[in-house]
Amino acid sequence: MTGPDRREPGAEVPLKFALMLGNVSGDDADDVLREFADQVLTEHGVPALRAEVEALRAAAAHVTEYRIPCPGHRLGVGADLIVQRMPTEDRWAIFNPNLDSPHRVWTGAQYERIGTDIYRREGFRWTRQEALDLAPGLAEQETARDRAWFDAVRAGRTPR
């Protein structure tokens, strides 16, 4: 089936779709793209791909921990920040195991110890997406903190 709003396999994105995206707000763009993807998948016989995507989405709902690499950190994968789900609720925390207590979580302003400085519920304050959005920036900050500490040790200064 072809026409101005349909595409053959391997064809360019239809002009109508490109124009449609130009007139769509950012909030609606995901819906438009999803609708277009559904149309392409349905028309070109790729229901198996759709089932695979849905299976991956369902599996992602069961993930309880993500490891976020600290790029360039001298400890490599041992320095990963940990985004972890609270076992009893869908609340997430960002742990930094590189600090003096591995139970320190990001509270939005600084790292605090769960159980000493704050209650567990306060530490698990993020949605999964919020935690995953924040963690890469925190990982870069952790690498910078570690480099400053290591440079101070090398220079013979007492690090803080």
Image: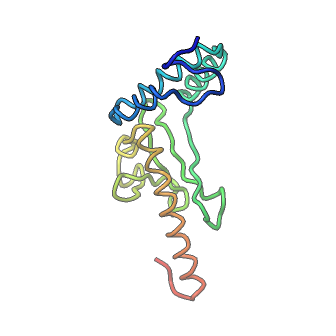
The relative height of residue 26 versus residue 70 in the rendered view (above or below) is above
Q: Where residue 86 sits in the image (x, y, percent)? A: 46, 36
Q: Where residue 109 sits in the image (x, y, percent)? A: 34, 58
What's the residue at 52%, 15% (across, down)?
Answer: 3
Rendered image quadrant of residue 91? top left
Judged left or right of residue 46, residue 94 is: left
Q: Where residue 65 sits in the image (x, y, percent)? A: 56, 39
Of residues 19 and 56, the one nearer the viewer is: 19
Q: Where residue 72 sits in the image (x, y, percent)? A: 61, 65
Judged left or right of residue 134, residue 25 is: left
The relative height of residue 13 versus residue 155 in the rendered view (above or below) is above
Of residues 24 and 90, the one nearer the viewer is: 24
What's the residue at 53%, 76% (across, down)?
Answer: 149
Of residues 58 and 80, the one nearer the viewer is: 58
| Residue occupying the far top of the picture | 1
What's the residue at 58%, 11% (across, down)?
Answer: 1
What's the residue at 49%, 52% (across, down)?
Answer: 103
The relative height of residue 58 versus residue 65 in the rendered view (above or below) is above
Q: How many labels does the image show?
A: 0
Of residues 39 and 104, the one nearer the viewer is: 39
